[in-house]
Image: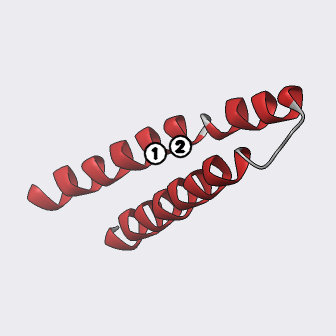
Amino acid sequence: VTDVAAAAEAARAAATTARVNVEINLGGIKDERVRAELAAEATRVDALAVRAEQLTDAVRQEIAK
């Protein structure tokens, strides 16, 4: 079960790191529509991070039993 939490945390780290990279590169995109679309897509990482945290919390609760 701890492998599941480790995988969730690795996925969260990868996604949030990718988001930061996208946000950094947004400044170089001249097309405002494209920039806005990419910025909006990047916010989807928030939901993934929340789900990963919930999964990790569930694993911790299971371990604490």
Q: Residues within 10 Å of mark 2 (few under 14, many from 20)?
A: some
15 over 49 or under it: above or below: below
Residue at left offset 9%, top offset 57%? 64
Quickly name the residue at label 2. Answer: 48
The numbered mark at residue 35 is: none
Q: Quadrant of the C terminus?
A: bottom left
Residue at left offset 59%, top offset 51%? 19
27 over 21 or under it: above or below: above
40 over 61 or under it: above or below: above
* Amino acid on which the number 1 mark rests in the picture: Ala
Residue at left offset 46%, top offset 45%? 49
Q: Nearer the viewer, residue 20 or 31?
A: 31
Where is residue 59 drawn, in percent x and y?
Answer: 28, 56
Q: Residue furthest bottom?
A: 3
Mark 1–mark 2 CB contact (< 8 Å)? yes
35 over 23 or under it: above or below: above
Secondary element at tag 2: helix
Say left or right for 36 vs 63. right
Where is residue 28 drawn, in percent x and y?
Answer: 77, 49
Q: Nearer the viewer, residue 6 or 34?
A: 34
* Amino acid on which the number 2 mark rests in the picture: Leu
Give the mark count: 2
> What whole-number distance in Å separates the C-alpha atoms at marks 1 and 2?
4 Å
Residue 40: image quadrant is top right
Q: Quadrant of the N terminus?
A: bottom left
Residue at left offset 42%, top offset 39%? 50
Say left or right for 25 vs 29. left
Say left or right for 61 vs 27. left
Q: Nearer the viewer, residue 44 or 7?
A: 44
Where is residue 8 drawn, in percent x and y?
Answer: 45, 60
Secondary element at tag 1: helix
Quickly name the residue at label 1. Answer: 49
